[in-house]
Amino acid sequence: MKEPTHIYPTHRCFDDAFEIIQDLIKYGVDPEALKLVHALCRPDNVIVRIGEDKPGTIAHAWVEYSCDDSTVLCVFRGVLDGVTLTLTTDSEDYHDSIKPYNITSYSIDEAIKMNLEYENLGPWVKEYLECCANGE
């Protein structure tokens, strides 16, 4: 039996999400079909702080792509076998995996506005900032 594949975080998901949006638009995806998503998450298999033995809450960002009326894909970056990859999965499966709550979705126009206002790629919500490792 094959061992399950573990995809590790890049620890730069807010930057990754903006880069993914740029790439998708560059390759012809309609910006109206994209949403930047920020959330707090409690994935079962992620230890948040070194030295802790239980999962904690993380702030996370990804892109949701509405392919058609019934299909929404989550696009994110992860590290597999030491290589950073852009990955895509069904939104229901992704949400089951990362267990997001306190979700904020931004249209591309809203995301650009927030980027300009805060002069960074996120997060922009206080609760998300508090969960980031550097608190910035």
Image: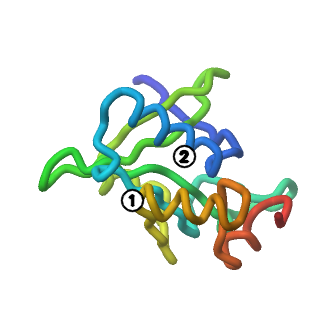
* Label 1 to label 2: alpha-carbon separation: 19 Å
Q: Position of residue 108 (x, y in %)?
A: 43, 55
Q: Position of residue 30 (x, y in %)?
A: 29, 42
Q: Return the residue found at the far left.
A: 69
| 89 relative position to 2: left or right | left
**What is the three-letter code of the residue carrying label 1?**
Asp
Q: Quadrant of residue 56?
A: bottom right
Q: Nearer the viewer, residue 42 or 72?
A: 72
| 55 relative position to 91: left or right | right
Q: Earlier in the sequence, mark 1 or mark 2?
A: 2
Residue 83: which disc?
Answer: none
Which residue in the protein does label 2 denote?
A: 17
Identify the residue at image location x=62%, y=47%.
Answer: 13
Between tags 1 and 2, which lies in front?
A: 2
Q: Which quadrant is home to the C terminus?
A: bottom right
Q: Position of residue 20 (x, y in %)?
A: 50, 38
Which residue in the protein does label 1 denote?
A: 96
Q: Secondary structure at mark 2?
A: helix
**What is the three-letter code of the residue carrying label 2?**
Ala
Identify the residue at image location x=69%, y=45%.
Answer: 12
Q: Secondary structure at mark 1?
A: helix
Q: Which quadrant is home to the N terminus?
A: top left
Q: Nearer the viewer, residue 100 or 51?
A: 100
Q: Nearer the viewer, residue 54 or 76?
A: 76
Q: Within 10 Å of the Cα at label 1, are there few (<14), some (14-19), or many (20+) other Cα atoms?
A: few
Q: Position of residue 22 (x, y in %)?
A: 49, 37
Compared to 83, does 12 lie above or below? below
Identify the residue at image location x=61%, y=26%.
Answer: 84
